[in-house]
């Protein structure tokens, strides 16, 4: 937090009016400060200096407001804040003491003025970082934040002078501008929230004009839970990302209004689904709805929100129930994140003291997961849960022709690329400038193109803009190849800045970026695993006899993390779709259709990464079916580890038709692999049986699938892998923590143990039978026959209880078996008068035989039926089919 505040801190001076204070860098050369610090006009010259400069630089006013005591200054971007990115704007929206974030500001208060040296008469203004927390309701009537300062404070209020105009940051987001010190509360600094500035006339326009990006407020205190917009880069991924808002939203005006009306209903909490094919603009639609709700004109209470992170820094969703503003949360790829959605809604369904919360689930279809989720949420009393919105390719073309979309997108891409270049992104390798009227190479004839998702028109527009600026790109046959060539150039620039000269391997980097996209990485350990797997698969077949150098792998990890930084709490992000899908297809083709197969089986990957890889391939294969074959072969090669994950992924995340296709492909791959001479018949019989059951239930009733496959994977990414389960393991229900696992034993061991267990049962039945036949107790001798079924029942009970479960309390674990052995021994003692003299006494022989036999019977039960193990303590991640 403090690091971001320090780098953006500047000194502001007006010597003519003897004014001095602090400012905050919004972007290179653009400074926000307090009006009473700059005091522009009246013949005075305002000068600014960042922390890396020696001299002050003159600045001019581009916007000012004496009412808000704020001013926006423009200086030479090369001399002030060179290379600094555009700041993220935010506000505090919740009041949850348990998760109140630490805020910080850095400035030049008078108390930090120091002599330049021991005997010097010259003074320097030193930096001071102040940290503290904000209780949102403190100062709310005066429309100011009150920062409660932690640590030492000046003894006199005047020593705070010079800190005015400093930017206040929370979770790396700028949320306010320091205004004044509360004289009654010496530990309180009053801060102007940025929401007042964004509502002021001309401020947004001034910022957009000088940065190229329209400022939007994001919930700064919820940032650990949110997936933030990507940092600006000259990459195709950034330019196509809907949250970058490079292109305007076209069409869908009616759908936007319907979603707005749904948001403004009277229910405290509600959930709805938004479905549509990939590339139809679901994420862009939600970005537009958020923009409209957060910029409500007049005195209406504005909304806040954003996209929920898949890997949040914490999962204390209860903070959302204390929102001061209504919240709209979007969950992308919702069909792959059902456990997270359940946890989220469980927190919101409880005590809810805050404003309304709306959750929109984005997915390609809702015919499978949405009905089951609705029923689950109804049982938790979560809102009406009755809405589902559908976005079709034609919706984006409503009132717009493909020609209109192409032309508008080309102008938008050209404008954003020029701004990125001005901000220092890219290099001087492009021979020509970027223009909006670039020749139509890939967009030729687009006015006659068939109606298709809007993303294809954007791809053609961006390809033409890039191909004009760099004629080398124009040699590509397809617009997607142009975008990939630009992505390669972007990643190469990142790699060249971090790797030794001459060591950048474009093909290796491309493979690693693909591995990054497939497996993801929540932690640095996951990142190392993905890099190692991608590196090994890339060099597969070249006979490397020594493992790769650890420093080399670390450097490659650093390249991937820098090229695609995480926008949530994960270790890194990834190249965006549809670029990633095209790149994956290239890597798979270049590897002879073996990359996906080998990558899925690499030992470095954890269960969570295998699951994500299968999920990503299954989703991508809907548009490029050829990618599924490698995954099918990988599952067939290692069904014990991969088949439960694959079946779970297919049934939970794909539509019915695609699920059937995937299961058919898996069935063929398993059948082919089962024909290999070295294939274990039991394993592949189990695999075929599981696929058949899943196929039957997919065709009949999907509600039973969770009981068969298990709940969607919620495996921690950094949990190490453990031995694989025995084929035939059955997953528990979604709410259970137990899983039935069979030990892996050979056929000989299975046969011997089972034979001994059956012999034990025969002995247990024979002993009381012999007693009943050889003993006469008058007319009641028939009572002894009751010991035969009683003894057999007791031994079967012990075997089933101890065979299928782990031992309970010590008392129970000892008493029940000893009582059973003692009961059978006591019946055998009645044979004492017929006992051979040369045998050991029955009180010694019988307990020994019964104990050995009961042990054999217990393990025979465990081998045949399996043992329930607690997944939270002892079961391995791979023990869980789901």
Image (tube, rainbow, N blue to C red):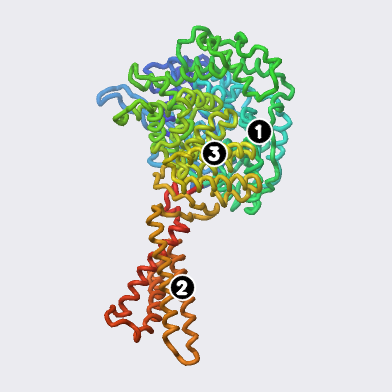
Q: Is label 3 in a helix, a strand or a loop?
A: helix
Q: Do we see residue 855 in this rendering?
A: yes
Horizontal side, residue 68 vs residue 510: left or right? right
The CA span between labels 1 and 3 is 26 Å
Q: Nearer the viewer, residue 714 or 598?
A: 598
Horizontal side, residue 823 vs residue 356: left or right? left
Residue 350 higher or lower than 183, as above or below: below
Screen quadrant of the N terminus: top left
Q: Give the quadrant of residue 561.
A: top left
Q: Do we see residue 183 in this rendering?
A: no
Q: Is label 1 in a helix, a strand or a loop?
A: loop
Question: Measured from the top left, where is residue 511 in percent x and y?
Answer: 44, 26
Q: Residues within 10 Å of mark 1 (few under 14, many from 20)?
A: some
Mark 1 or mark 2: name the one nearer the start of the chain. Answer: 1
Mark 3 or mark 2: name the one nearer the start of the chain. Answer: 3
Residue at image coords 49%, 89%? 780
Q: Residues within 10 Å of mark 3 (few under 14, many from 20)?
A: many
Residue at image coords 49%, 45%? 684
Residue at image coords 68%, 46%? 385
Residue at label 1? 276
Which circle marks residue 666 in the picture? 3
Q: Residues within 10 Å of mark 2 (few under 14, many from 20)?
A: some
Which circle marks residue 792 in the picture? 2
Horizontal side, residue 553 vs residue 798: left or right? left
């Amino acid at each position: 937090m403090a690091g971001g505040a320090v780098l953006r801190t500047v000194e502001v001076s007006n010597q003519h009016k003897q004014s001095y204070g602090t400012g905050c860098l919004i972007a290179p050369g653009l400074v926000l400060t307090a009006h009473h610090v700059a005091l522009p006009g009246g013949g005075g010259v305002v000068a600014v200096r960042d922390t890396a400069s020696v001299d002050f630089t003159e600045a001019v006013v581009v916007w000012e407001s004496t009412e808000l005591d704020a001013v926006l200054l423009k200086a030479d971007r090369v001399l002030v804040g060179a290379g600094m990115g555009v700041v993220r704007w935010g506000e505090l929206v919740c009041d949850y003491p348990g998760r109140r974030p630490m805020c910080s500001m850095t400035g030049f208060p008078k108390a930090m003025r120091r002599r330049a040296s021991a005997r010097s008469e010259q003074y320097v203004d030193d930096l001071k970082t102040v940290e503290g927390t904000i209780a949102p309701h403190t100062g709310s009537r005066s429309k100011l934040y009150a920062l409660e300062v932690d640590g030492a404070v000046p003894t006199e209020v005047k020593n705070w002078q010079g800190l005015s105009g400093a930017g206040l940051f929370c979770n790396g987001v700028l949320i306010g501008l320091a205004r004044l010190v509360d004289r009654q509360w010496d530990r309180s600094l009053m801060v102007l929230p940025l929401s007042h500035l964004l509502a002021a006339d001309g401020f947004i326009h001034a910022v957009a004009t000088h940065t190229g990006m329209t400022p939007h407020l994001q919930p700064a205190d919820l940032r650990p839970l949110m997936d933030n917009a990507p940092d600006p880069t000259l990459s195709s991924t950034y330019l196509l990302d809907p949250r970058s808002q490079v292109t305007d939203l076209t069409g869908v005006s009616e759908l936007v209004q319907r979603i707005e009306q749904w948001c403004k209903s009277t229910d405290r909490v509600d959930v709805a689904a938004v479905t549509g094919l990939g590339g139809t603009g679901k994420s862009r639609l939600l970005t537009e709805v958020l923009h409209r709700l957060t910029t409500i004109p007049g005195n209406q209470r504005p909304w806040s929100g954003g996209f929920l992170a898949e890997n949040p820094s914490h999962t204390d969703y209860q903070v959302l129930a204390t929102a001061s503003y209504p919240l709209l949360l979007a969950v992308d790829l919702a069909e792959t994140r059902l456990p997270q959605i359940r946890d989220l809604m469980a927190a919101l369904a409880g005590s809810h003291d805050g404003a309304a919360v709306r959750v929109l689930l984005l997915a390609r279809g809702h015919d499978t997961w949405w009905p089951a989720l609705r029923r689950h949420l109804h049982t938790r009393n979560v809102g009406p849960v009755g809405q589902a919105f559908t976005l079709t390719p034609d919706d984006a073309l409503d009132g717009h022709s493909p020609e209109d979309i192409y032309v508008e997108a080309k102008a938008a891409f050209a404008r954003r690329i020029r701004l990125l270049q001005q901000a220092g992104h890219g290099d001087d390798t492009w021979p020509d400038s970027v223009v909006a009227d670039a020749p139509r190479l890939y967009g030729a004839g687009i006015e006659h193109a068939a109606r298709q998702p809007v993303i294809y028109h954007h791809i053609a527009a961006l390809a033409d803009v890039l191909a004009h600026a760099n004629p080398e790109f124009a040699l590509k046959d397809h617009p997607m190849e142009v975008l990939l060539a630009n992505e390669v150039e972007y990643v190469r620039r990142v790699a060249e800045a971090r790797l030794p000269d001459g060591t950048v391997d474009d093909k290796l980097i491309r493979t690693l970026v693909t591995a990054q996209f497939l497996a993801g990485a929540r932690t640095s350990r996951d990142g190392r695993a993905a890099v190692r797997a991608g590196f090994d698969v890339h060099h597969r077949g070249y006979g490397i006899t020594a493992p790769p150098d650890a420093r080399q792998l670390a450097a490659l990890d650093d390249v991937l993390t820098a090229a695609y930084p995480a926008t949530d709490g994960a270790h890194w992000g990834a190249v965006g779709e549809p670029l990633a899908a095209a790149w994956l297809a290239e890597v798979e083709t270049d590897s002879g259709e073996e990359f996906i197969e080998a990558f899925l089986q690499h030992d470095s990957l954890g269960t969570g990464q295998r699951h994500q890889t299968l999920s990503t391939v299954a989703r991508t294969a809907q548009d490029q079916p050829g990618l599924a074959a490698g995954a099918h072969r990988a599952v067939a090669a290692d069904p014990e580890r991969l088949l439960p994950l694959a079946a779970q992924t297919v049934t939970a995340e794909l539509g019915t038709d695609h699920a059937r296709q995937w299961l058919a492909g898996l069935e063929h791959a398993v059948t082919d692999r089962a024909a290999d001479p070295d294939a274990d018949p039991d394993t592949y019989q189990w695999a075929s049986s599981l696929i058949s059951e899943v196929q039957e239930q997919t065709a009949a009733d999907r509600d039973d699938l969770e009981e068969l496959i298990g709940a969607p994977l919620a495996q921690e990414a950094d949990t190490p892998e453990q031995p694989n389960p025995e084929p035939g393991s059955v997953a528990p229900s979604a709410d259970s923590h137990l899983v039935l696992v069979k030990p892996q034993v050979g056929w000989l061991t299975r046969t011997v143990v089972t034979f001994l267990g059956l012999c034990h049962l025969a002995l247990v039945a024979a002993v009381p039978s012999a007693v009943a036949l050889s003993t006469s107790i008058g007319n009641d001798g028939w009572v002894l026959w009751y010991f035969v079924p009683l003894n057999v029942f007791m031994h079967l009970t012990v075997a089933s209880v101890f065979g299928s479960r782990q031992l309970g309390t010590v008392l129970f674990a000892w008493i029940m078996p000893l009582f059973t052995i003692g009961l059978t021994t006591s019946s055998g003692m009645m044979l004492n008068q017929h006992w051979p003299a040369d045998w050991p006494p029955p009180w010694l022989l019988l307990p020994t035989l019964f104990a050995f036999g009961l042990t054999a019977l217990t393990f025979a039960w465990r081998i045949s039926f399996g043992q329930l193990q607690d997944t939270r303590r002892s079961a391995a991640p791979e023990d869980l089919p789901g």
